[in-house]
Image (tube, helix red, strand yellow):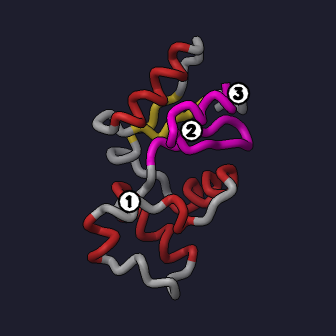
Amino acid sequence: MSTNTLTIWHNPRCSKSRQTLQIIEDSGAEPAIVKYLETPPNAAELKAALSKLGISARDLLRKGEEEYKTLNLANADLSEDALIDAMVAHPKLIERPVVIKGDRAVLGRPPENVNELL
């Protein structure tokens, strides 16, 4: 994959994800679309994305999901690796959409954040 390729971790049921994808397509870019609920990232891919985003695993967690509560992910003693493992096992916990281009990434919240990569 070229470093200029735009990749979006997309959930078609999410309005923010759809809006972000629309901005990308309207710019003329043809992104690689990864439906991350069907094809979840592995731990290495998640770590790479977090590094590019410049945030911690905790910052990428969807805290409103049932799994967040049942897995007790609010526990401050959990390590970065434990949180990443939870997201790999339960991709619904990953905040969306994540857009990656080369060594940079943004979270499409708000969707206009993607303009930084276009």
* 67 relative position to 56: left or right: left
Image location (x, y in percent) of residue 96 = 44, 46
Report helix, strand or loop for mark 1: helix
Give me the residue at 38% from left, 64% from top: 63
Marks 1 and 2: in contact by CB < 8 Å? no
Q: Which dot, 2 or 3, sits closer to the camera?
A: 2
Query: Residue 48 falls in which quadrant of the image?
Result: bottom right
The residues bearing labels 2 and 1 have C-alpha atoms spaced at a distance of: 16 Å
Instruction: Classify 10 Å Cα crowding around label 1: few (below 14), some (14-19), many (20 and above).
Output: many
**Labels 2 and 1: the sequence-earlier one:** 1
**Badge 2 is on which residue?**
99
Query: Any magenta on residue 113?
Result: yes
* 75 relative position to 26: left or right: left
Query: Residue 51 falls in which quadrant of the image?
Result: bottom right
Report helix, strand or loop for mark 3: loop
Report helix, strand or loop for mark 2: strand
Residue 100 vs 82, above or below: the answer is above
Image quarter where the C terminus lies is top right
The amino acid type of the residue labelled 1 equals: Leu
Task: Magenta stretch: give its range.
Answer: 96-118
Residue 19 vs 71, above or below: the answer is above
**Badge 1 is on which residue?**
93
